Image: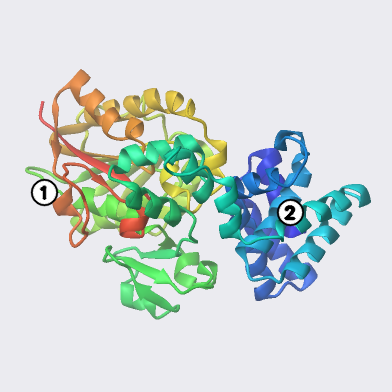
Amino acid sequence: MLAFEVLRAVDERDAYANLVLPPLLRKAREKEGFEARDAALATELVYGTLRRQGTYDAIIAACVDRPLREVDPPVLDVLSLGAHQLLGTRIPPHAAVSATVELARAVLGEGRAKFVNAVLRKITRQDLDAWLAEVAPPYEKDAEDHLAVMHSHPRWVVSALWDALGGGRAGIEALLAADNERPEVTLVARPGRIGVEELAGAAETEPGRWSPYALRLAEGGEPGAIESVRDGRAGVQDEGSQLVAIALANVPLEGPDTRWLDGCAGPGGKAALLGALAAGRGAALLASEKQPHRARLVERALAGNPGPYQVIAADGTRPPWREGSFDRVLVDVPCSGLGALRRRPEARWRRRPEDLDGFGPLQRGLLTEALKAVRVGGVVGYATCSPHLAETRVVVDDVLKKHGGGELVDARPYFPGVDALGDGPDVQLWPHLHGTDAMYLALIRRTA
């Protein structure tokens, strides 16, 4: 029932599962005696169903006698939950069918529960590999459609990721498969506030792969149970996000290095790390966020920072600061989020190609103002959590071509120890190569 509630919230309210699920789990623990294994199963059912939705839709479509669009959404959610139990877990088929029909009876009524039972019985006739062989078009006939069904991504997303990644079949299949894996929880020990060794002693962890401040939390670990996470000395932050902040901080500058800006600071993860790094250099951070409620999240993340900082609510396309006010500027622009599909699997079904038309002018405006905000000789870091070329290199090239006054800096040396960084000068991280979200960073030095 809990997993069904989350899927309905995602479908009806455009909610995100990672925001809806935790409070429901807490309530279930408090009022219904939910145990850890119950919570783990509910979490797997939610995220597994959302990740494999496209594949399950194709299989369910082969088992019903009407177009899938004519199946009521609540019924389709129940069928998808049942399909995931049958094809994506080790739950015995009879138990999966029985539990799903019982759910259908409770939330849909007896008549539609019979329909659910009939469809699930058809799905049980073969395993996932056999179903994929039946419902996915041959790769040789339509490579993108084949990959879309096999790896449960919209076709346009497959095409966009393939263009950004380049290469042949093996690379794109590895990337799409990585998008469907459960991401690790990565912690950041904010320098000057807590050391990595002290944080490691507070929970079962392993060192991060690349960031000197990263620790990977053991499976099943609860970040909220760690005191240093609760009080802000440490945080939950993907390693790719950490690397972007570290790279900007590592670029050498000539002249002063005392004023740093995070121009799109919400919800505050990068700002907290930048603020800690700035404090270690004797620099001050200004963290700006357009939305007041997100600015409050930034304030919370920065509270207790060892050095000077200020948080303001301001529009980065119409900033209140004077031109040339900063030595280092980070602008992590709003984007499609295609680089974080492991964490927000519903985003792949929610986004549309035309969404990029709305993001493009905003991204260009923010980068243009960021270049104005930095002094001559200072550096801007343009970051997105998307590998889509229309949100990364195309934006950077367009702004530099139109406005001039800046040159790309090779970012690769400022990701020390990280391999497979491509030809530069910008850096694109990948889930299947680096174990991070697909973060992008271009470093631009203002020259005039």
Query: Is 312 situated above or below 411?
Result: above
Going 33% across and 51% down the picture, which residue do you hit?
A: 171
Chosen colour scheme? rainbow
As helix, strand or loop, the secondary structure at mark 2 comes to helix
> 323 or 418: nearer the eye?
418
Residue 202: % across, % down: 44, 78
The amino acid on which the numbered mark 2 sits, given as a three-letter code, is Phe
Image quadrant occupied by the C terminus = top left
The kind of secondary structure element at disc 1 is loop
Question: Which label is found at residue 275?
Answer: none
Q: How far across and how far down the image is residue 226, in percent?
A: 49, 72
State the residue lying farthest toward the left: 254
Q: Front-most of 113 and 433?
A: 113
Q: Nearer the viewer, residue 323 or 23?
A: 23
Answer above or below: position of 300 versus 62.
Answer: below
Q: Is residue 385 visible?
A: yes
Q: Tag 1: Cα neighbours inside 10 Å, few (<14), some, or many (≥20)?
A: few
Quickly name the residue at label 1.
Answer: 252
Q: How many marks?
A: 2
Percent from the top left, x then y, of residue 117?
83, 56
Looking at the picture, tell me which residue is in the foreground, 448 or 412.
412
Q: Which residue lies furthest to the right in this view?
A: 110
Identity of the residue drawn at 10% across and 30% down: 447
Q: Disc number at residue 4?
A: 2
Report the Cα–Cα distance between label 2 and label 1. 52 Å
In this rendering, the label closer to the viewer, 2 or 1? 2
At x 19%, y 46%, the residue is 258
